[in-house]
Structures are given as C-alpha cells and as structure tokens.
Image (spheres, coloured by chain):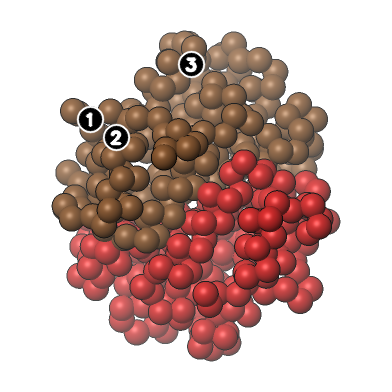
Amino acid sequence: MSRIPLTPVESLTPTARDFLRRRGALNVFRLLAGAPKVFDGWSAMVDAQLDGGSFSPRLRELVILRIAHLQRCAYQIAQHTDVGRAAGISDAEISALSAEGPVPGFAEPENTVLIFVGELCTTGTVTQETFAATRAVLDEARLTELLLLISLYYGLALVLNAAEPDIDDQARLETSP
Amino acid sequence: MTRIGYCATMPDEVRKLAAERGNLNVYRALAHAGPPFAGWMLAGRAALTSKVVPARLRELVILRTGHLMRCPYEIAQHTPMAEGVGIGSRQLRALAADGRLADGGFTPTELTVLEMTTELVTTASLTPALLDRVRESLGDERLLEVLMIINRWSGLALMINALDVDIDTDTHFSMPTDDPH
C-alpha cells in the first residue's frame, strides 16, 4: 500500500486527467499528482521524452529496465518488464538486465549503452574511456537524450522507493503518442 | 573540460528556455537533445517557481543532494542561491557529504527533511518511520515536492558528472517565472 495517499482520478486537474487518459491511469501518476504545482511540468517532460525522443522503443526500454534493476525499484521493474516485452526484449534479455555486475549477451551499440548506464548509476559518474566509447556510438543529440532518460528514471526510482505505491494490476504505460 | 561541445544552433523554443535560465553551460550542453531537453526545462520551471516548498528548504535539499552525488557543479551553482535565502556558513559546512547535519543548527523540520534526503540518496530506499516523520511535519503535498526535488537534482547530478560540465565563470543562473510570456 502506498505510504503517501494516491489522488483519486476524479479529483485530478483537467491537464493531469488528460495525461492519465493518454498514458494510463498508473498509480505512480496518481501519486505524483498529489503535487499539482509540479505535476504538469513533470508530465510534459515525460510526453517530450516519449513523443519527441529519437530512441527505438527497444533501446529506451533496455535503459529503463537496467536502471530499474540497479535502483531496486520493484514498481519500475513491474511496469517496464511488460513494456519492454512489447518493445521486443526477450525473456532471456530481461533476465540478463537484472545482473549484479556486467550485463551479458547484448550486441553493439546496446552493450556500450548498458555499460554507460551501469557505471553512471552505480558510481555517479563515468570514466573518460566509458564516455568516449559511448560517444563513438551515439552522436551529441542522442548522448544527451540518453542522459535525460537516465536522469528521469534514476530520480523517479527514488520517489517510488520512498512512497512504494502498489504495482498496478492492469494499467500499463502507454508509450505511443 | 566539458566532454561535448556546447549546442550552437538551437530551435527557437529551446533557445528561449536556455536563455530564460541564464544560458548556463549545463543547458548549452544538454540542449543538443532538442525536444526531450525542452520538456526537462519545463519540468524545471515548475520545480523552481512552485511556492509549496519554501526556497530555503528547497536549496537545503538541493545542496545536500549535490554533495551526496559528488557534483561540484551543483554545489557551485546552488551555494550562492542558498546564501541568498539565508543559509549561513555553518549550515553550508554541515551539508557537505562528510559534514554533520546535527551541527548545522537546522530547525527540527529541516533536519528531518535532510535526514530523509541523505538516506534516500545514499541507499535508494527509505525507512517508513522516517518518511512518516517528514509527512507529519510537511504534509503530503510538500513531502511529494521535496521528493521531486531530490528526484530532479540527483538525476541532474548524473548528467552533469557524465558530461563533466565546466563550472560557469561569466554567466549567472536566472530564476524563471511561472508565466514567462
């Protein structure tokens, strides 16, 4: 049970209600909607990443699932295991993303991106070597997009781990516009 | 030195958002991303203009997060902002990663919020009793906004550290307004 009460759907502001209608009536959104002064800005950022990003759904979900495991965020793991499967990530790959150390079995450029994510989330920075290897497979636009994606899910995992909303029974994140 | 070049040609919306916030190096580096960067700036405007969490408490949480995430850029940017809202040198010292929060002379509410920030940023989890203490002093909306501040500035620290963004020398942060137009 969520340690902070969730906002009932009928009490949401019109903008928040529209966001949940488009993206799914997830418990995480009902949790964050309890801070209405910042929720609309935050949800605009989520829309911008999902609709305005250039990553394939598969690469995006690989990154998110890896972060979810590194942050031990049960809520994100539950949501994005299903979203990741729909994006073409196999059960064996999903299992590999929960590895404690290096993640085995991915081809380039996914392997390099997952090393970058792992190092950044566990040490708070990346070595010049890791940065250069990632820059070699991602141009500046995609590298900064990767950072914004990591930033979103790494930070959100902290909120979720603090508040522990229930994992949704049915509702799943809608990633298409 | 910043590990990528700064974005020289920005679409209008992105350019306006970066200019509104003082064209800091971190914005000029991240602006390469285009629409996701614009979305991130909109979320930042909401976080900085909301009056739900007093500016003093916001800056305490940001600085503590910046120290725990070992992000010199965040510390450099937010130390003057903290001083501007009355956070003194003794308190700034206590907020350091190896500082003792108990020595900062913080109010009981501030101390509880900083203890929550410390536990959450360093362990990625939170004891229910500590969350409940913050809930009792802040109420749910302010607690959620504090959690969103920790969310944003811990994630930002990762971006800044990965890019090794140079600390600004000749530009200054400018506070956005909630209705820039």
Residue B53 seen in render: yes
> Type of residue at label 2?
Gly
x and y percentages locating residue A28 in the rendered image: 68, 59
Of all chains, the one bearing label 2 is: B
Taking the spot 75% from the left edge, 38% from the top edge, the residue there is: B140
Mark 1 and mark 3, same subunit? Answer: yes
Residue B180's label in the rendered image is none
Taking the image as shown, residue A169 lies to the left or right of residue A78, namely right
Number of numbered callouts drawn: 3
Name the residue at the front extreme: B181
Q: Name the residue under label 1.
A: B171
Q: Nearer the viewer, residue B171 or B109?
A: B171
Helix, strand or loop for disc 2 = loop
Q: Mark 3 points at which residue?
A: B85
x and y percentages locating residue A121 in the rendered image: 45, 56
Callouts 1 and 2 close, C-beta under 8 Å:
yes
Gap in angstroms between the C-alphas marked 1 and 2: 7 Å
**What shade does chain B have?**
brown
State which quadrant residue B170 falls in. top left
Viewport quadrant of the C terminus of chain B? top left
Of all chains, the one bearing label 3 is: B
Taking the spot 42% from the left edge, 38% from the top edge, the residue there is: B180
> Type of residue at label 1?
Thr
Residue B22's label in the rendered image is 2
Q: Which of the chains is red?
A: A
Viewport quadrant of the N terminus of chain B? top left
State which quadrant residue A48 falls in. bottom left
